Amino acid sequence: MRKRTGAPFSMPMQKTNNQQFEQDWGDLRSRLRTEFLNRGSVSEQKCEKLLMDARWPDGMQCCSCGSDLLTRIPTRNTYKCKECDYQQSLTAGSIFHSSHKPLTLWFEAAATLIDAHARERGSLWTIQRFGEVFDLAYISARRIRGTILDDLHSPDGILEAIVCVPFRPDS
């Protein structure tokens, strides 16, 4: 019989230098937008604007042809390209695609995980606890928590650009 190692629900982190890892969480927490730590204080419309600004700083573009001539279809909450008639949602091609969860949940969850890890309580945020706080089933909690942590550790992740204020080095 194999013996289990590590915490039963925690996901292993892919950092080799523990000091650098803790410093990264501390840096993220220092730049955290505090409104995401207060559940329910951010509207879905504000989250959509933050996502659009983070993904397309120069304006939204078609995922199919790259055109910037898009019109919004309010009844379907999608955008239609005027050149190729391709329809896309705001979350198409991102980690939020087909999750059926509001953006507010994703952003609040990411902010909560950053705060917990920076305070060295990240290991206490098991998938079960995460699911209880955000009222998610275990499978959804595992998927969302894992996706958030992977995105935050990715050099081209989008969550950091949304839930944290941009880094501005002193000039």
Image (tube, grey):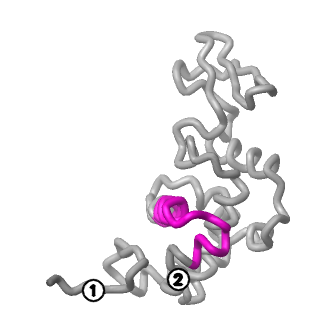
Residue 75 horizontal side relative to residue 115, left or right: right
Residue for point 52% across, 21% down = 64
Q: In this view of the protein, can residue 171 be seen by the observer? A: no
Residue bearing mark 2? 122
Classify residue 8 by image quadrant: bottom left
Range of magenta residues: 129-149
Q: Is residue 72 above or below residue 2?
A: above
**Crowdedness of circle 2 by 10 Å Cα count: few (<14), some, many (20+)?**
some
The vertical placement of 126 against 101, above or below, is below
Relative image position of residue 154 (x, y in whole percent): 44, 59
**Residue for badge 1:** 5
Name which quarter of the figure residue 3 lies in. Answer: bottom left
Question: From the viewer's perspective, is 55 left or right of 37?
Answer: left
Magenta-drawn stretch contains 145: yes
The residue drawn where x is 38% and y is 85% is: 7
Earlier-in-chain disc, 1 versus 2:
1
Q: Residue at x 44, y 79 (%)?
A: 21
Quarter where residue 49 is shown: top right
Q: Residue furthest front?
A: 1
Q: What type is the residue that disc 2 sits on?
A: Gly
**Which residue occupies the foreground of this view, 1 or 102?**
1
Q: Position of residue 6 (x, y in %)?
A: 33, 86
